[in-house]
Image (cartoon, rainbow, N blue to C red):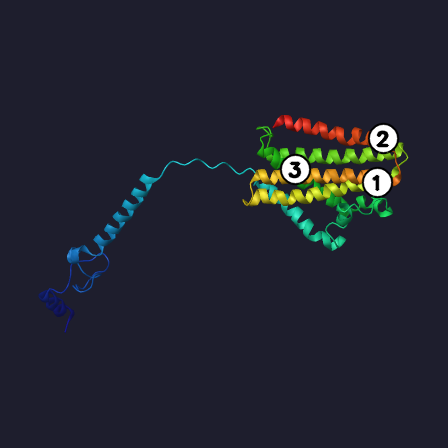
Amino acid sequence: MSISDLEQESAGQDSVSVRSHVSDVTFHDTANIITRINRDSVNGFPFRFIERNRMLDLEVKTALREKLKPGDELPPGKFNDDWIIFFVFIAAFFYATLPVYSRKLFPGATRFFLFRGVGEPESRETSELFHWQSTLFNLVTFFNIAIFIYFAFSHYGIIPAEMSGFAAWAAALGVVIAAVSIRHIACMLTGWFSSSDEIFREYTITIYQAYRYAGFASFLLSVLLAYTGIFLPELLFLSGFIIFAVLYIMRTARLFLIFMKRGVSILYLILYLCALEFLPVVVIVKYTTGLF
C-alpha cells in the first residue's frame, strides 16, 4: 500500500489531529491526557487543578502577610568582627601547642594559687621571661586581655564613634603592654635602689604569672562573648572583672609574703604599695567609673 493510500484512509477515518506545535503528527487518544486535544475535557484537568493550587497557595500567603506585624531591626553584632577571629585562632593554636614545649600549660599555677615556693631560688629566676616561648606567651596574653577590654568598652559605649574596632583594640593593646613594661621597669629600679634585687625579681615573676592567668581567662570569656549566646554579656563581664580583682589581690598577697619571709619592714612595704600599687589602681578606677 502506498503512502497516498494511507493518507486517504486515515483522512476518511478522522483519526489524525490538527498540526501540533510539538510534532508534525499527533495521534488523538481520548484515554490519554497528554495526547488529548480538547483541554476542556475532564473539567480541564490538569490545568484547572494546577491553577487552583496556585490560587490556594497565594491565598495562604496573603492571609499570613495580613497577620504579620512590623518588627524591629536587629542590632549589629558587637563582638563578632571579622578581624577578631584571627587573634582567637592565634591564641587557640598557641594554648593547644604550648604543652609540647613546657609539658604543662601553666607550670607554676599550683604554687601561685596555693602561695607555695615563696622565697625559693627558682621563684626569682627572671631568665625564663626572655625565652622566645615566654615572649610569645606574653604577647598572646596581651592580645587576649586587649580583646576583652575592647569588648567591655564596646558594650558600655566607651569607645568614640569615629574610632574603628581594630583601632580601639590596638589602643587597648598598647595600654596593656605599656602598663606591664612600666611595672617591670619600676620593679627593676626599686630593687636596684633598695638593694633588694631578689625580692623584686621574684615579684616580677609573680606579676607576669598573674597577667598570664588573666589572659587565659580573657580568652575563654572573649570566645563566649563573640561566638556563643549561652550567657548574658553582663554576666561574663562581671566574671572577668572578678577574676582580675582576685588575681590582683593574690599578687599583692604574694608580695606581702615575700616581704615577710625576707624580713623587710612593714612600713617599707606599705610605702611601696601606696606608691606603685594602690595609687595607679585608684586612678584607673576613678577614671573608668566616671565614664560609665
Q: Secondary structure at mark 2?
A: helix
Q: Circles 2 and 3: CB distance less than 8 Å?
A: no
Q: Amino acid at mark 1?
A: Ile
Residue shown at 76%/41% (left/top)?
Answer: 208
Foreground residue among 86 and 108: 108
> At numbered mark 3, what does the secondary structure look like: helix, strand or loop?
helix
Read off the residue under disc 1.
258
- Comes first in the chain, label 1 or label 2: 1
For the N terminus, give its image quadrant.
bottom left
Report the residue that reaches farthest toward the right.
195
Is residue 176 positioned above or below 133 on the image? above
* Mark closer to the observer (2, 3): 2
Q: Residue at x 82, y 31 (%)?
A: 270
Q: Residues within 10 Å of mark 3 (few under 14, many from 20)?
A: some
Which numbered disc covers residue 267? 2
Q: Using a 10 Å C-alpha cutoff, classify the residue at mark 2 as few (fewer than 14 neighbours), some (14 to 19) or many (20 or more).
A: few
State which tag comes first along the sequence, 2 or 3: 3
Residue identifier under label 3: 241
